[in-house]
Amino acid sequence: MASHPIKGDYDVVVIGGGLAGICAAIAASRLGSKVALVHDRPVLGGNASSELRVGISGADVSGGGLARYARESGIISELCIESMRRNPDFNSSFHVQDVVFWDWVRREPNLTLFLNSQAQKAIMADDQSIQGVTVVQTSTEESFSLSGMIFIDSSGDGRIAADAGAEYRVGREAKGEFGESLARDVADDQVMSSTLNFTVKDLGRRVDFEAPPWARSFKADDDLPFRGHTISPTEYFGGFWWLAYGGIRDTIKDNEEIRDELLRLLFGLWDHLKNRGDHGLANMTLDWISPIPAKRESRRFIGDYVLTENDILNRTSFHDRVAYGGWPIDIHPPEGIYSREPPNTSILLNDLYSIPFGCLYSRNVRNLLMAGRNISVTHVALGSTRVMGTCAIIGQAAGTAAHLCAKHGLTPRELRERRISELQQQLLKDDCYIIGIKNEDPVDLARGATVTASSEESLRITQADGVEPLDKPLAQLFPVSEASIERIELLLESSLGSPTGIHLALRRAGWINDLTSTQDVAESDSVVSPGRSWVSFRLDFDAEPGNLYWIRLPEARGMGWCYQKEAPVGTNRAIHVMMDGHYGWRSKRGSHILRLTPVSKPYSASNVVNGVARPERWPNIWVSDSDKTFPQYVDLDFGKSIMIDTVHLTFDADLDTNIYLPPPWGIFGAKIMSQIVRDYALYAHDGHEWVHLLSEAGNYHRRRIHRFNPISSSRLRLEVRATNGDPSARLYEIRVYHQGT
């Protein structure tokens, strides 16, 4: 390290400022670690930056996934909610989003950002430990080194990890290695192809285009098999994801040549769109071209565990799970546009899967973590884990782990063996979701409180916004709070000329996306009259309160089931359709309309301390009665006077809606989600009266942390004065702490 001046000594050094690196660096710094974030570009965000303009995707599959309530929370949620609020126009979003990323990083007092800085070499303490990295900052012509305790390589290609000697692999495994059905018969060194984004603009007048001589030629649509290439002038357009190439090359060493070939392909494609047939683009011109290929795959570093296709499809419940995914297993051919096969293989997932901590650190470099697309997965599994929303929560997990390693003097492997529960509980505390794990924080004082509320909403699904034809089976999942289901009424519509019988089956569900049961726990027959009417089904079923159930209607042509566009939290509407060559249930936005007797009341105040902050095996949310006016409140009774000075609040940010894209895919541009609580106050009862602690106005974030002077209190009240438009107050979780404990 003597050849380079030492710029700083850090607890955690993060290499790469894409979403994974941003979330890793912020997570570690917020917990108290001294952090350096080194990024080789002038703007943060990686593929999500204005330089590449790749839309953020995650487990919600851009709003079209089979799993409900799947959108990522934690730091990535903060970033995207802030970006959505600051961007009234999606077309300018990437430039403003760059600044949001920069702003969120620069807010952290423990975090030092090095932009335009390339980490070039790993400085080794021994053959299994990194001591530091050498860095060249091109904008200042400085060369320096950074030393640290724990290193996170979130750079995608993993230059520092590779230089440190971390084991990695490149290419596609053979079927026999991990028993993956989607793997190759014979292993090779090819990877998924890269792409080059571009945008177009309508100038309102004819714009001619003459292809340069170096452009590739696509004379007819047959030259682009399986690749639809319609551009609507009225919708946002960011290129074609299948405009790809490079997986048959070395995507690191040949990256410049890959970029050049992608430019040739792009201009050839534009020539085809403009001059080879009528594509309706006479007034359109190329507006922007990314200077950098968006890379899907290069090195994958080997950890103590390698995630496989089978882990994803079987939803393996790892003891060390720290993140989750839900994007399809989406594999792109190495040849890219030159492949005569379909441009991708996509296996839809009907539920979320877990990602274990054993995939996030090197098995042979002791103090090295990975975050992003370079984690320990097979080529097939990478088809799902590589998208940016998933990479972001992997990054937060890695950053949190790095802090704990530095704090306790542990390697990541030792953390996994000795303190994995501490890592998981810290992630939950910081608003990350881990499948099937609840808040068990021993110092969270809210966990022992009795919770009451000013009012509680009942399950209501009564607003008919449309009709789903019963030309295929339909289903509706819902929570049941009572000990019986005496009767279910459905709003059905029939175009048949006479009353017609229909059969209803009731089944149990284990969790919000569980429509797998084939066992009917109750059945009922009824008659549907012509026209639209409420149809009653008598069940007299002894239910288990606090559980999820679903009903199934069979195909009944000439009939339809009315639905409501906005779904009550903790419900799931589905249709039975052909997917990936077989029939299965596909979730849809909204809820089929039904009424239960007795009425279900699943949104009780006690949900805010049950340990889960999104729908899972229950709605897990308090919702006030929508017929009641504000203010509405939740009271926590601790049973005795205790010292408190910190409150964590987790509001409803509609995790079932995409916020990364504009309509019709998502709600980007709406500025603020209506469900989020806007104005509120906290009060503590000192044994004599309510003492005002603080008031907040204009909130638009899901998670808020409030600290105040310590006070002895037997009760705490959250008073909701207004939301951003929703008629109900909504709260997933409240945590209460005394920082002195």
Image (cartoon, rainbow, N blue to C red):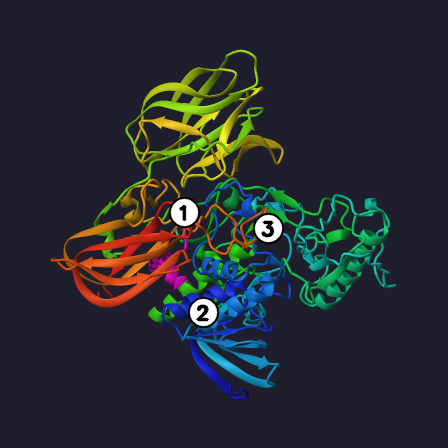
Of residue 486 and residue 546, the one placed in the foreground of this image is 486
Expressed as whole percent of the image width and height from the top left, the position of residue 232 reads 71, 48
Which residue is tagged 1? 726
Expressed as whole percent of the image width and height from the top left, the position of residue 454 reads 25, 45
| Label 1 to label 2: alpha-carbon separation | 47 Å
Q: Nearer the viewer, mark 3 or mark 2?
A: 3
10 Å neighbourhood of mark 1: few (<14), some, or many (≥20)? some
- Part of the protein shown in magenta: 413-434
10 Å neighbourhood of mark 3: few (<14), some, or many (≥20)? many
User: Which secondary structure, mark 2?
Assistant: loop
Amino acid type of the residue tagged 2 in the rendering: Asn
Looking at the picture, does residue 467 appear above or below residue 75? Answer: above
Of residue 300 and residue 606, the one placed in the foreground of this image is 606
* Mark 1 or 2, nearer chain start: 2
Expressed as whole percent of the image width and height from the top left, the position of residue 555 reads 55, 22
* Mark 3 or 2, nearer chain start: 2
Q: Is residue 241 left or right of residue 442?
A: right
Amino acid type of the residue tagged 1 in the rendering: Asp
Q: Quadrant of the C terminus?
A: bottom left
Which residue is tagged 2? 367
* Mark 1 or 3, nearer chain start: 3
Q: Residue at x 45, y 45 (%)?
A: 69
Q: Residue at x 51, y 67 (%)?
A: 101
Magenta-colored segment: predominant secondary structure: helix
Which residue is tagged 3? 383
Q: Nearer the viewer, mark 1 or mark 2?
A: 1
